[in-house]
């Protein structure tokens, strides 16, 4: 698996990308100066799937290279990029691993999106109570234990 040194940001800064005209995009056409909200939060680049930048849904170029680097970094069989925050990634992961009406082991302190996925997929949760480690680097750091909750 070949992973070039330059990343997505370096590619976005290249002249052929900067000068491309996005006829496929509605709205502000990548003019972040037009959108005061984007400017306030420091967004300087707004690109969608164009051939020169690859496609998140079917990566073959620079996005695939980023996923390959993540795969090597975390020593995983496969790696994926996710958009729309943690909720989207968590829902996608659960939907990938669980069939409708499956049982799922869930810590009581799980992210809200876990409970949403349980509802969406009609899963049967088996709750476990996290143990509280009082002497840890992080205050009240919790780990799952085999204790079953009613």
Image (cartoon, rainbow, N blue to C red):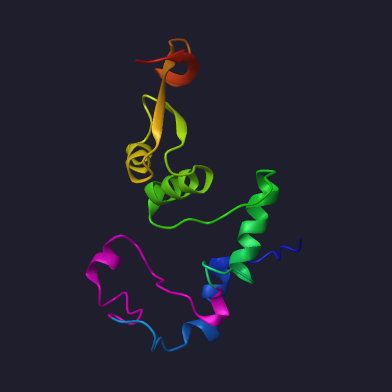
> Which residue sits at x=65%, y=43%?
74
Is 61 drawn above or below residue 3 in the view shown? Answer: below
Where is residue 106? Give x, y as percent. Answer: 43, 28
Question: Residue 59 at x, y = what percent?
Answer: 59, 68
Instruction: Magenta stretch: give its range.
Output: 27-54
Q: Is residue 150 magenta?
A: no
Q: Residue furthest right?
A: 1
- Figure check: 60 above or below 149: below
Q: Is residue 68 left or right of residue 98?
A: right
Residue 83 pos. (x, y %): 43, 58
Disc count in the image?
Answer: 0
Q: Residue at x 33, y 82 (%)?
A: 29
User: Which part of the image, by quadrant, shows the C terminus?
Assistant: top left
Vertical placement of residue 39 versus 125, above or below? below
Residue 137 can be seen, yes or no: no
Magenta region, mostly helix, strand or loop? loop
Please say if 70 is above or below 9: above
Q: Is residue 15 left or right of residue 117?
A: right
Work out whether residue 119 or residue 4 is closer to the camera in this orientation and state it: 119
Q: Pick whichever, 22 or 89, lies toward us.
A: 89
Which residue is farthest front?
Answer: 101
Question: For this rendering, which residue is in front, 128 or 7?
Answer: 128
* Left or right, 122 with reference to 55: left
Residue 61 visible in rendering: yes
User: Which image quarter is the N terminus in?
Assistant: bottom right
The x and y percentages for residue 128 are: 43, 20
């Amino acid at each position: 698996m070949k992973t070039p040194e330059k990343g997505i940001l370096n590619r976005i800064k290249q002249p052929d990308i900067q000068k491309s005209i996005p006829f496929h995009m509605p709205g502000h056409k990548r003019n972040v100066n037009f959108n005061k909200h984007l400017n306030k939060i420091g967004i300087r680049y707004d690109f969608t799937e164009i051939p020169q930048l690859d496609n998140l849904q079917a990566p073959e170029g620079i996005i695939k290279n980023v996923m390959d680097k993540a795969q090597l970094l975390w020593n995983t069989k496969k790696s994926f990029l996710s958009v729309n925050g943690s909720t989207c990634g968590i829902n996608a992961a659960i939907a990938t691993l669980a069939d409708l009406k499956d049982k799922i082991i869930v810590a009581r302190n799980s992210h809200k999106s876990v409970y949403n996925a349980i509802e969406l997929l009609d899963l049967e949760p088996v709750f476990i109570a996290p143990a509280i480690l009082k002497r840890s680097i992080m205050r009240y750091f919790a780990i799952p234990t085999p204790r079953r909750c009613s």
